[in-house]
Amino acid sequence: MSVGSASSAVATSRPLTARLADYRELAKPKIAAMALVTVALGYLAAGGSDGMTLLHASIGITLVAAASGALNQYAERDTDARMTRTAKRPLPAGRTGEAEALVFGIVCGVAGADYLALTVNPLTALLALLTLALYVGVYTPLKRMTAWSVVVGAVPGALPPVLGWAAAGGGAEPGTWLTAAGLFGVLLLWQFPHFLAIAWLNREQYANAGLHMLPGQIPKAGWTGKAAAMTAFVLLPIGLVPTLGGGVGWGTAAAATVAGIVYLYYSLRFARAETRPNARAVLFASLGYLPALLLAAAIELSWGI
């Protein structure tokens, strides 16, 4: 019996509750939940007001997000097995069969895109498929080739508010598309210091797994921190664009500015001294930035401020 067959046999013999928990892990629900928050923000900022349309968009996008997580883990099952931080995932740990994970990902992706096309609109379905294709088909294999993969990977990570804009009807009105573009830019730039800090903290694991990340490709001290600080600096003015588009108010701009200054401060500290405490500080600052921005926008959009 082959290793793959043995893994499949073990996976199918496990209790249903345990297998469902593994499917949940394949779907990366935390990432999907954050994406849905930004989808809702993009929808409301674009003037969307139909709760059922937002619900349908959320269901379809959740399915496509689950497909992204599952297919990414299927493609990276061998490298995941070589890293401590990912070795306990369902595939490298042998709890889920390879064919099972692949089918789960494909079914979720097709079902999600079809659902969006039927219940929301074709543009939202197309953008969701583009997000899936960029993440799984471009970013994932590029990680084995070049550190520039992080730039490509940031694009699908920044598309959820654009999906929300599309679900609200899209349109070429300056306010709606500028707000959507601003939210896209915020999420795009926010990711760089965040993931650079993670890559620096886990640089040995990534190198051992054969994945090309900036800290491993440019071993000269300071370059990872400088890249984080540079993108955090550019994020400051971009954080004002959604407000300039009119989709959100000045409270959101204020939150983005204050949180952005904190983010930049810790990124500059990381640039001056690449240490584990400084990298962790950048990571924690990044985890504070998005909730501050999203909370301010949610308050403004809910109360009509």
Image (cartoon, rainbow, N blue to C red):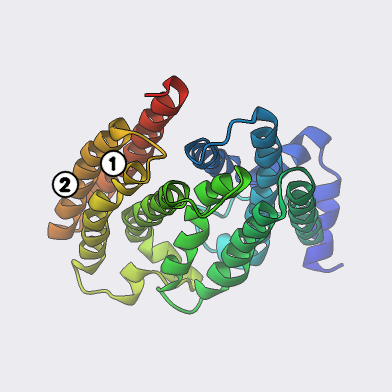
Residue 224, percent from left and from top: 26, 65
Q: Quadrant of the N terminus?
A: bottom right
Q: Secondary structure at mark 1?
A: helix
Residue 285's label in the rendered image is 1
**Residue at the image position 21 percent from the left and 58 percent from the top:** 229
**Residue at the image position 52 percent from the left and 74 percent from the top:** 142
Placement of 142 over or under 126, stated as above or below: below
Residue 187, percent from left and from top: 41, 51
Q: Quadrant of the C terminus?
A: top left
In the image, is 147 to the left or to the right of 98?
A: left
Placement of 54 over or under 224, stated as above or below: above
- Labels 1 and 2: the sequence-earlier one: 2
Name the one closer to the observer, 179 or 297: 179
Residue 125 lies in what quarter of the image? bottom right
Question: Which residue position is annotated with label 2?
Answer: 265
Badge 1 amino acid: Ala
In the image, is 82 to the left or to the right of 198?
A: right
Cα distance in 3D space between marks 1 and 2: 9 Å
Residue 76 visible from this viewpoint: no
